[in-house]
């Protein structure tokens, strides 16, 4: 089995994934949030940090590219190969954001299957020495588009097809459309990776039971909410609160070194807590204080009291049953998503 960390703009950057890799079950691959392909592309400092081996030591990182112009995609891929040594890249066909889809990119590209087909033909021809994987939704307006889209993907040597089985119009609402994933699964013509709503070990057990030949899983919001999720799935025990505290400390310190000013650091940390907070019992009043903090001092006080006074709801150290260690409701269906990335 292989486990991948999902690309999440503003969250799963090099700071987060390096700290994650040190404290939790290592992922087989870490996908970067998307880099926009442009003519005469020059990588920004932020993008260089995302793809450079120096800032991602020991991690298998796959850069993701957002594009609908094949030449721009190829040029950007060559920079990633020649300057940063990447042999594998990923194409974003899933971003539902209005500003992205309006330009016919991300999930917006799915609405133009003929153009997409020509684009894929060009990039696979133009980059014969690189592995290109695709991360896709299963349609733009409706699920009925999926058969035609999948037939297009089948024509190319797609390294891996990562399927988030929602259509663009779902954004993050509704349930994953498992019948669409099933269609691709039954054909077995491309290596598949499942992505979508793996929030708990039970979710993983259910999906892997339904699609037993799927060997690859990608985790996004569930993993950010509970960084111990994949450790629990693969190792059978859930890392404890001390581990989470040490992990948090490392992310916090790394951001302080990287970013200037309390405001920028706190912005990043608050975004993280909008997920991670939900893994604690009675988190509301602590999250409120974290959200309101303007300075490190208030922030640290709020975080310290959360760690001191509350427990993790996702299993204890030796929990293999998947039951809630604190005996509380483990529902994580209020995990953000619908409004954070659109
Ligand atoms: C805040 C946020 C940022 C995201 N950024 C990206 C991105 O840069 N590239 C991408 O392909 N998907 C992105 N996604 C989508 C996730 O990678 C993933 O496909 C989606 O969240 C479904 O998986 P999950 O249910 O495990 O979270 C983002 C999602 C969120 C919520």
Image (cartoon, rainbow, N blue to C red):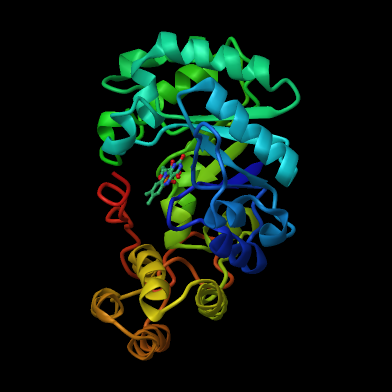
Q: Considering only vertical position in the picture, is 29 above or below 20?
A: above
- Closer to the camera in the image, 176 or 100: 100
Q: Is residue 255 toward the left or the right of residue 340 in the image?
A: right
Q: Position of residue 339 (x, y in %)?
A: 25, 49
Can you tell me which quadrant of the image ligand 1 is in?
A: top left
Quadrant where the N terminus is found in the figure: top right
Q: Considering only vertical position in the picture, is 281 above or below 232?
A: below
**Residue at coordinates 41% horizontally, 66% vertically from top-left?**
324
Q: Is residue 178 toward the left or the right of residue 55 in the image?
A: left
Q: How many marks?
A: 0
- Closer to the camera in the image, 66 or 278: 66
Q: Position of residue 333 (x, y in %)?
A: 30, 53
Q: Position of residue 289 (x, y in %)?
A: 26, 81
- Closer to the camera in the image, 324 or 247: 247
**Residue at coordinates 63% horizontally, 28% vertically from top-left?**
132
**Residue at coordinates 50% horizontally, 56% vertically from top-left?**
12
Q: Position of residue 256 (x, y in %)?
A: 51, 78
**Residue at coordinates 39% horizontally, 74% vertically from top-left?**
326
């Amino acid at each position: 089995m292989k486990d991948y960390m999902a690309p999440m703009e503003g969250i799963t950057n090099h700071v987060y994934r390096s700290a994650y890799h040190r404290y939790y079950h290592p992922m087989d691959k870490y996908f970067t949030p998307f880099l926009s392909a442009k003519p005469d592309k020059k990588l920004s400092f932020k993008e260089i940090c995302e793809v450079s081996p120096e800032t991602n030591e020991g991690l298998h990182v796959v850069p993701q590219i957002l594009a609908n112009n094949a030449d721009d995609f190829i040029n950007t891929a060559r920079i990633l190969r020649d300057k940063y040594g990447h042999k594998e890249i990923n194409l974003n066909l899933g971003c539902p954001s209005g500003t992205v889809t309006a330009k016919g990119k991300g999930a917006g590209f799915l609405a133009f299957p003929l153009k997409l087909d020509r684009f894929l033909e060009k990039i696979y021809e133009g980059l014969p020495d690189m592995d290109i994987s695709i991360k896709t939704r299963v349609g733009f307006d409706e699920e009925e588009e999926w058969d035609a889209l999948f037939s297009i993907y089948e024509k190319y040597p797609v390294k891996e097809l990562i399927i988030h089985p929602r259509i663009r119009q779902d954004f993050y609402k509704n349930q994953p459309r498992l019948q669409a994933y099933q269609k691709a699964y039954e054909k077995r013509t491309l290596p598949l990776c499942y992505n979508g709503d793996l929030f708990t070990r039970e979710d993983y057990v259910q999906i892997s039971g339904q699609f037993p030949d799927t060997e690859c899983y990608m985790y996004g919001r569930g993993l950010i909410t509970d960084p111990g999720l994949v450790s629990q799935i693969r190792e059978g025990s859930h890392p404890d609160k001390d581990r989470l505290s040490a992990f948090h400390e490392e992310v916090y310190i790394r951001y302080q070194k990287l970013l200037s000013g309390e405001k920028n650091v706190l912005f990043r940390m608050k975004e993280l807590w909008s997920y991670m907070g939900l893994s604690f019992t009675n988190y509301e009043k602590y999250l409120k204080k974290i959200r309101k903090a303007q300075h490190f001092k208030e922030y640290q006080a709020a975080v310290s009291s959360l760690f001191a006074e509350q427990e993790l709801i996702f299993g204890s150290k030796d929990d293999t049953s998947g039951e809630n260690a604190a005996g509380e409701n483990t529902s994580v269906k209020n995990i953000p998503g619908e409004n954070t990335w659109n």
